[in-house]
Amino acid sequence: MDVLELARWQFGITTVYHFLMVPLTIGLSVLVAGMQTAWVRTGEQRYYKMTKFWGKLLLVNFAMGVVTGIVQEFQFGMNWNAYSRFVGDVFGAPLAMEGLVAFFVESTFLGLWIFGWDRLPKKVHLACAWAFSLATVASAYFILAANSWMQHPVGVEFVNGKPTMNSIWAVLTNNTALAAIPHTIAGAFSVAAAFIVGVAAWHLWRKRKTDDEHRTAWRSSLRLGGWVGVVAFAVLAITGDTQGKLMFQQQPMKMASAEALCHTEQPASFSIIAIGDVARQNCEDVKTFNVPALLSFLAHNDFSTQVKGVEDLVTEYQAKYGTNYPNDPALGELAGKPIDYVPSLPVTYWGFRIMIGFGAISAGIGVLALWFTRRGRIPDTKWFPRIALLGIATPFIGNSAGWIFTEMGRQPFVVVPNPSGVDGVWMFTAQAVSNVTTGEVWTSLISLTTLYLALGVVELFLMRKYVRGGIDGVLPPPKDPKRDDDDALAFAY
């Protein structure tokens, strides 16, 4: 493999791994703040127990997310310094806001929340929970604003061969970002909901034959996870529809690739599933089960819109952006070679369907959780807790597939041209890579992958330990009346 391919593999592996932590942190942080709010308002012990237990798991995941996220920014300088120089004037602002504002608030108030139990007034301590949870969402906002600029460049002018930002407001209110942010946050709640449902269902089944004093907390957790999962999927469907319409306007090749639509259709059918090799651009050997005219509706809210296929779009892209890469030695083997404007059709086609399918499965498990806990019931079927535990993986898979589809669907561009934007503001992925050797990239790829595997083992060990420990494992020990309260830390974790 050449430097470009190795660099893409490294970024893909580390990014997907890091993103396993991110949605769980975002979703759990807000839900834990909600649990604590319920406890402060009602004084019910079940909400206190829920806050302590899920808060513990949140802290483990948050710490791992910070560790794995550090590598992401370093990679821009390691393997993608040409890209960093090109987008630096634009990316500097939202990434600085994320670090100096969102992450600073997040880490500061998380620390106060951790060590403030029994030391801060209840409402002040609760305010700390909401501060760090909302800062987590704000952090995602700034990162997504930067990523959305890569998908749809706005708020810039082209100066001396590179984009120069002239409106931070345009970058932060990019319509691509405003569609991506609620979709991503809904995905985060879907992940947190499935996690809560799986763990709570397992604990209820585990203590089914005993008079467990924590049963009400587990049942409330199970119902909370069920409701959040169902609502999150509904929001995902609505925001996904909005993103699809923007994709039709801004990245028509990505839309055609998501459907393996090789030839232009009017009206265009939506492919439910394909049988055959979707990797070939002519699609002659592919048989699909279609819903007539549905793709036209998803693209433009009517049943008659034309949707261009891959073959016609290739011709348009070649006319706009050239047929061959520049004859630049920095491009290595690709210098002067023909540009392949078609992303990997199997990845985009199946990634899109994996995203939708696993999201729907997760929501279905949430519906089952609500059904089995209706009218005060406790799940008593052997198969449900097993399905719920397996279901924890479904939104993680759906989220990962969605991001892989989003990022690989814009290839060969790392910065996608805005059809109605400033001329020249785009960049091919082949132009973005650093001038490094394959040996150097192999070294960092192997090192980081090995490190991430070790961190994965640590994450699973800690999560398993505290999940199995249950609520008893996170509650503070009973106070000793003979001991001065000031002699003990309030840090119950």
Image (tube, rainbow, N blue to C red):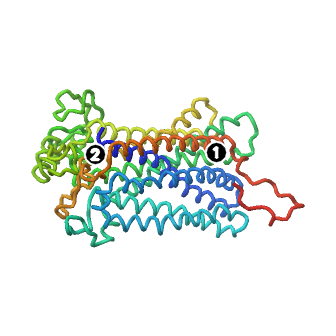
Residue indicated by mark 1: 219
Residue 17 horizontal/vertical position (percent):
46, 45
Q: Residue furthest right?
A: 482
Q: Which amino acid is tagged 2?
A: Gly
Residue 411 horizontal/vertical position (percent):
25, 47
Relative height, residue 482 to residue 442 (above, below): below
Helix, strand or loop at label 2? It is: loop
Say left or right for 102 vs 426.
right
Which residue does the image show at 52% across and 44% down from the upper left?
194
Residue 493 horizontal/vertical position (percent):
69, 54
Q: Which mark is residue 409?
A: 2
Q: Earlier in the sequence, mark 2 or mark 1?
A: 1
Q: Check the picture and name the quadrant holding the N terminus.
A: top left
Q: Which mark is residue 120?
A: none
Relative height, residue 458 to residue 427 (above, below): above
Which residue does the image show at 51% across and 40% down from the upper left?
453
Q: Residue furthest bottom?
A: 166
Say left or right for 421 vs 124.
left
Q: How many marks?
A: 2
Decide which of 330, 171 is in the foreground and name it: 330
Q: Quadrant of residue 470?
A: top right
- Report whether residue 239 is seen: yes
Which residue does the image show at 32% across and 36% down from the upper left?
350
